[in-house]
Image (cartoon, rainbow, N blue to C red):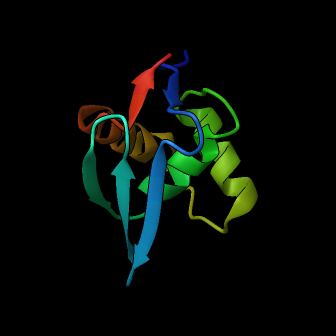
Amino acid sequence: MTGPVYAADEAGTVRSVALDGLVALYHAPSGMTHIVAPPAPQILEALRDGPGDARAILERIAALYEIDDEAGAGSIEARLAELEAAGLVRRA
């Protein structure tokens, strides 16, 4: 069974700046700045290819980065919930 499908805002609505292992994200639609740690920036990057559930996002990230799939989609689901609460992703 697949979980919820998530989408991110269009490219250009979120600006990012790397800060020693963290990333500052300015979300223009809300006017808020968020400080996030991996894998949040990678999840947002993966969602630029279109909406996806946790498994699809994990597969997109794994195609770009060497990752340990031990935590798997459950870890991605937890980060997606945090990003949704922050207003950086939404359910599609």
Vertical position of residue 43 compared to residue 16: above or below: above
Q: Residue at x 37, y 57 (%)?
A: 25
Q: Left or right of 78: which side holds 73?
A: right
**Residue 40 pos. (x, y %):** 42, 54
**Residue 60 pos. (x, y %):** 69, 46
Q: Which residue lies furthest to the right in this view?
A: 63
Q: Which residue is drawn at 24% across and 47% down?
A: 32
Q: Left or right of 61: which side holds 87?
A: left
Q: Residue at x 42, y 63 (%)?
A: 38
> Is residue 71 at all visible to an observer of this figure?
no
Q: Give residue 21's quadrant in the image.
A: bottom left
Q: Residue at x 40, y 36 (%)?
A: 77
> Is residue 22 at all visible to an observer of this figure?
yes
**Residue 71 pos. (x, y %):** 45, 53
Vertical position of residue 68 compared to residue 51: above or below: below
Q: Which quadrant would the N terminus be assigned to in this image?
A: top right
Q: In front here: 39 or 31? A: 31
Q: Left or right of 29: which side holds 57?
A: right
Vertical position of residue 28 compared to residue 19: above or below: above
